[in-house]
């Protein structure tokens, strides 16, 4: 069973749960579940907790997954540069035949970059964390173009609409979603005019939460799948480009999570569609290590914690399905906390207190790999633990370890054993999504930015596939929580989150000319427009640059 599924297994039997499910046969459903969205054999469902085990054990079900946290890629700049500019006149060009979809958080519909002749460019905004309005997904509120236009005429548009994009932004640094949106499709009223200034916009606001100290968007895999469905339904028959700058550290990095399979299903069944994702900013995060283990060998992996960290921490270990490993866990003083039994779930005890759990799964159904999850609660008072892998039965030997993202107290591997490759974000490894890394466009040597995550995927495919500008990018700045309407503000941010929407705008340019292209043809055209990157000093940089630097002149 999926480790996160085990965690939610016990509780109020009548509580409704949202899950992702992979069926053995399309349209052949188990009992006691309500289908919310369908993507071929993969569906999102709701069910009561009392039915969870029977659904899991059904012969109709290939895989059942609990929601996993999907945070926004963090912004690298700690002190953004903000400025207020004069507003430029924007002509009412004909509306594009391509729709732009964005799944993120904090969309300032009052910003001039998304208004033409007093009218909004937003078709819809689905605020998933808002009060339920009766929509088909079962939660959140869908705001229409008409409602936004009505609010724009009001002195207090955010209050009128009941939606403030920067409600937690006290200092005016600007939200992630508005900044990304300006890069992808800003009309030039304030920010630099994008390559797609007249596309209609459909937006999914995953909501602001504060989990483990993070103030970034923290939706989950089920809600993200719903967001993808919402974008495709809103676009109807229009060509569609979706941008997602989302993802954490963990999972198998083989592109086979149910969310990544949904991405590939959409891209291979819907012509004129592309999904662009940022590679992540985890190249130097020291959250990944991998190697090979032999039979009867013991490999020690030091796991380091922040001082006074009271947030939960999680490590995932993925290894070949033909192998059998176990783990021994030692504390700071090398006291043995757990000597695990393969494929048995066991509590981790320290000083007679339960401080965590070790979950061990055989042959995860989507990857056919074995999976060990070590979950530590917030009671831990340690500087480091040692995780000792033991090779019980070894035919393949390769293993990958990931420490999950924790913005409130990130634990790391000892830097001496951490690997910088295979650090792409957790949901950007599907076969057909377009994954983008970031380079410094202000330096004539165009170096890949130090934080931009590296491929390849764990199964050896190229991700990211190209790089785009991502250093101190000036774009639209949303209203702070103290403002009643957007000023003509820009803010500067760095990250692969800034590179992905730049590429998305160029993909929209391709589809405006050739709206019937399938994803294979779109990818071919896009990669042909890259200038090859050569790295004389570090050959590993090819794992971070893919086909090279996108050259907009080869598309425009």
Image (cartoon, helix red, strand yellow):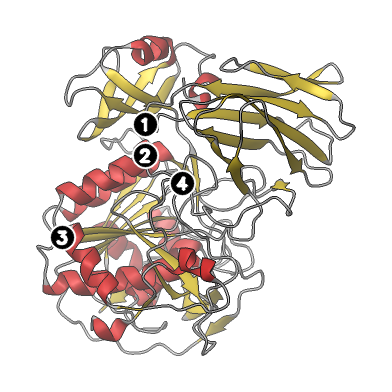
The local secondary structure at tag 4 comes to loop
First along the sequence among labels 3 and 4:
3
First along the sequence among labels 4 and 2:
2
| Near-viewer residue (352 or 105) | 352
The residue singled out by tag 2 in the image is: 256
The residue singled out by tag 3 in the image is: 272
Q: What residue do we see at 49% from left, 83% from top?
A: 441
Image-quadrant location for residue 109 = bottom left
- Number of the label disc, if any, that sits on residue 307: none
Tell me the CA gap for discs 4 and 2.
11 Å
- Number of the label disc, if any, that sits on residue 366: 1
| Near-viewer residue (142 or 546) | 546
| Near-viewer residue (288 or 8) | 288
- Number of the label disc, if any, that sits on residue 458: 4
Q: What residue do we see at 47% from left, 48% from top?
A: 207
| Near-viewer residue (519 or 89) | 519
Q: Are marks 4 and 2 in contact (CB under 8 Å)?
A: no
Q: Position of residue 383 (x, y in %)?
A: 84, 41
């Amino acid at each position: 069973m999926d480790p996160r599924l085990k965690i939610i297994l016990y509780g109020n039997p009548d509580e409704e749960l949202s899950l992702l499910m992979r069926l053995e046969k399309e349209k052949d459903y188990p009992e006691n579940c309500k289908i919310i969205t369908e993507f071929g054999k993969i569906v999102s469902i709701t069910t009561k907790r009392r039915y969870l085990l029977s659904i899991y054990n059904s012969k109709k079900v290939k895989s059942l997954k609990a929601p996993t946290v999907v945070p926004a890629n963090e912004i690298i700049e700690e002190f953004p540069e903000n400025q207020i500019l004069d507003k430029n006149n924007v002509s009412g060009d004909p509306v594009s035949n391509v729709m732009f979809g964005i799944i993120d958080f904090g969309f300032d519909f009052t910003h001039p970059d998304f208004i033409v002749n007093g009218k909004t460019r937003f078709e819809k905004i689905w605020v998933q964390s808002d009060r339920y309005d009766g929509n088909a997904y079962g939660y959140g509120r869908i705001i229409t173009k008409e409602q936004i236009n009505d609010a724009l005429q009001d002195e207090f548009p955010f209050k009128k609409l009941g939606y403030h994009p920067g409600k937690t932004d006290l200092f005016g640094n600007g939200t992630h979603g508005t900044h990304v949106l300006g890069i992808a499709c800003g009309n030039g009223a304030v920010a630099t005019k994008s390559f797609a200034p007249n596309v209609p916009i459909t937006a999914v606001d995953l909501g602001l939460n504060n989990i483990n100290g993070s103030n970034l968007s923290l939706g989950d895999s089920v809600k993200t799948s719903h967001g993808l469905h919402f974008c495709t339904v809103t676009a109807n028959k229009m060509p569609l480009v979706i941008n997602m700058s989302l993802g954490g550290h963990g999972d198998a990095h083989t592109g086979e999570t149910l969310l990544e399979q949904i991405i590939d299903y959409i891209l291979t069944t819907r012509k004129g569609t592309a999904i662009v994702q940022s590679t992540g900013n985890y190249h130097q995060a020291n959250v990944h290590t991998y190697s090979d283990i032999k039979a009867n060998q013991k490999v020690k992996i030091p796991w380091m914690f922040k001082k006074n960290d009271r947030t939960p921490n999680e490590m995932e270990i993925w290894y070949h399905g033909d192998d059998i490993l176990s783990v021994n866990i030692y504390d700071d003083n090398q006291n043995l906390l757990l000597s695990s039994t393969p494929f048995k779930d066991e509590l981790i005890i320290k000083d007679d207190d339960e401080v965590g759990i070790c979950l061990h799964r055989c042959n995860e159904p989507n990857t056919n790999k074995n999976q060990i999850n070590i979950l530590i609660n917030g009671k831990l008072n340690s500087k480091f633990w040692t995780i000792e892998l033991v090779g019980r039965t070894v035919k393949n030997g390769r293993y990958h370890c990931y420490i999950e993202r924790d913005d409130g107290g990130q634990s790391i591997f000892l830097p001496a054993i951490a690997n910088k490759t295979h650090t792409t974000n957790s949901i950007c490894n599907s076969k057909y999504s377009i994954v983008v890394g970031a380079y410094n466009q202000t330096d004539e040597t165009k170096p890949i930015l130090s934080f931009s995550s590296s491929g390849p995927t764990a199964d050896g495919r190229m991700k990211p596939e190209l790089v785009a500008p991502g250093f101190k990018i000036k774009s639209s700045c949303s209203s702070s929580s103290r403002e009643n309407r957007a000023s003509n503000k820009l803010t500067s941010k760095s990250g692969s989150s800034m590179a992905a929407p730049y590429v998305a705008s160029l993909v929209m340019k391709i589809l405006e000319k050739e709206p019937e292209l399938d994803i294979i043809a779109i990818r071919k055209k896009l990669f042909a427009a890259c200038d090859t990157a050569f790295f004389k000093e570090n050959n590993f940089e090819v794992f971070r640059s893919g086909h090279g630097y996108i050259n907009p002149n080869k598309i425009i």
